Amino acid sequence: MKQQLLTQSKLASSASELSEKNKLLNKLSITDGLTGINNRRGFLDSVQHLVNSSYNEGKPAMLLFADMDNLKQVNDRFGHKNGDYAIKSIAQILQQSFDTDDVIGRIGGDEFCVLLRDEESEARCAAALQSLLAERRKEITLLPTLSLGSAVFSGEDVVTVKDRADRALYCAKNELKARAAAAM
């Protein structure tokens, strides 16, 4: 009987330890190791969960896609350590710029997405972000600019909305390149 109680206690302890390790593994699987924000999987899972929840039913939402401009030049000229610092800085700026209810994720190397739980004006978001970036650029001269694209949810799945925001982002990038070429 004593041995059985000891075995049950060890099993309970092992089960508890296993549960904690599984929670840690799950967190690691959805978190970007460099920035500490959601990675692609964590972002898409969180957004899909929110979009499907009854809490958000009927409420407008917007997906903002942000891409760092010229990160390759920062990496080439100043090294990847400084490029990583720029990526972390952008993640911090995004966290400071949006509400805690909004979902932020690093989707790829220099690409970020934000789910705004209220349909906000892209122009207002862009102005607030660019203002904070300009302020931070006084401290961090290597900080690249951001190009932005957005799409409003209208019943589609997250990936479709993300793809629309991505297309809007590349239209903005192409306009920026065309203006730069015309200014030369």
Image (cartoon, grey):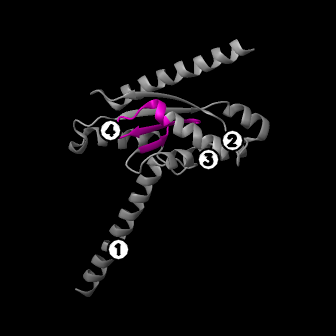
Residue found at x 59% / y 35%? 110
* Left or right position of 143 against 17: right
Type of amino acid at the residue the image marks with label 1: Ser
**Residue 146 locus on image (x, y percent):** 59, 33
Disc 1: which residue: 13
For marks 1 and 3, give the CA distance.
Answer: 41 Å
Is residue 108 visible in the rendered image? The answer is no
Disc 4: which residue: 48
Disc 2: which residue: 83
For marks 2 and 1, give the CA distance.
Answer: 44 Å
Magenta residues, start to end: 103-125
Query: Which callout, 3 or 2, points at the residue further toward the start of the chain?
Result: 2
Type of amino acid at the residue the image marks with label 3: Ser
* Left or right position of 5 against 182: left
Residue positioned most to the top: 182
Using the image, determine if residue 45 lies above or below residue 171. below
Which is in the foreground here, disc 3 or disc 4? 3
Q: Secondary structure at mark 2?
A: helix
For marks 3 and 2, give the CA distance.
Answer: 10 Å
Type of amino acid at the residue the image marks with label 4: Gln
Front residue of 34 and 58:
58
Of the 4 image quadrants, the one containing the C terminus is top right
Q: Secondary structure at mark 4?
A: helix
Give the label on residue 89, or none.
3
Is residue 31 visible in the rendered image? The answer is yes
Residue positioned most to the right: 77
Dot 2 crowding, Cα within 10 Å, few <14, some 14–19, many 20+: many
